Amino acid sequence: MTTFRWPSGFDPLIGFRAVQRELNRLLNVPSSEGYPPVNVYDADDAYVVEALLPGVGTSEIDLSITGDTLLIKGTKPPLPDVEEDRYLRRERGHGTFNRTVVLPDSVDVGQVTAKQTNGVLTVRLPKSEQARSHRIDVQAT
Amino acid sequence: MKVNVQRRDKGAVRPTRDEDLGNDTIAPLADVCETDTGWLLVADMPGVAKEQLEVQVERGVLTISGQFGTEPPEGREIYQGFQRPDYFRSLALSDEVDRANITANLTNGVLTIVLPRAQAAETKRIVVEAGE
């Protein structure tokens, strides 16, 4: 699986990731770096964030937004009623997750919607009025 | 979040040697565990709906395949953490598995396959008659 790379090797989130790691370490916050996997899209009037969360029910997902930061928290449960020693193969993983997605600009918090289909969480965050691009008319003098 | 990759393949449900799947196909992550009545196989296949899923058993090989059906949202992708792959995985089943009674369920992107244990042949007691 290839990771998206900006053409010049520039990753706008790289600085943030380093700070987040350091903050988490200092505050002893367990951070599930990289889980859930997310995609972020810019749909002109809104940002759309997709997250892969198979097996996590809608009531087990804790979504919150502060300014331009979306926080996806929750718990992926292990298989019910199965003791550890009865596993022959264990690849899926389970536990609490905590993923921060910093968006390029501020969003209209009251208009954010989220839905989950087939284990894919889709969050639609309409950009705030300031964040939208505005056409500026050039006056001829 | 703990991802514990343990492989104690005891034989009843074993991965086969898959050829190169190709760039856009991945094997879904799976848990296999033993239950009181047989085995359970649970695979994460986010994005797959029933219409894009196929589960087959042929000559003792269980094959799971599916496509990522959920369309990407409109707009420009500015960060990619995952792609939209096809899923494919095959596992060999031993004779201990009752192949005719395998059931599967797809909920919220998770495929759960119940593999019942085959009933052991009943032991028949043979009466020995006393000879002359």
Image (cartoon, grey):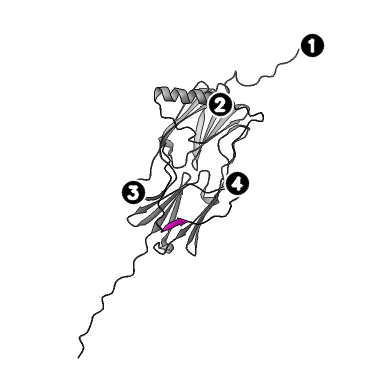
Residue kind at label 3, given as amino acid type: Asp
On the rendered structure, is A42 left or right of A19?
A: right
Residue kind at label 4, given as amino acid type: Asp
Residue kind at label 2, given as amino acid type: Ile
Q: Which mark is residue A14?
A: 2
Q: Can residue B103 be seen by looking at this rendering?
A: yes
Say whether mark 1 and mark 2 are on the same chain. Answer: yes
Q: How many marks?
A: 4
The N terminus of chain A lies in quadrant? top right
Question: How many angstroms separate mark 1 from mark 4 (CA)?
Answer: 53 Å
Residue underneath mark 3:
A85
Secondary structure under tag 3 reads helix
Callout 3 environment at 10 Å: few (<14), some (14 to 19), or many (20+)? few
Residue underneath mark 4:
B24
The relative height of residue A73 versus residue A107 in the rendered view (above or below) is: below
Please name the residue shown 66% across and 19% down the image: A134
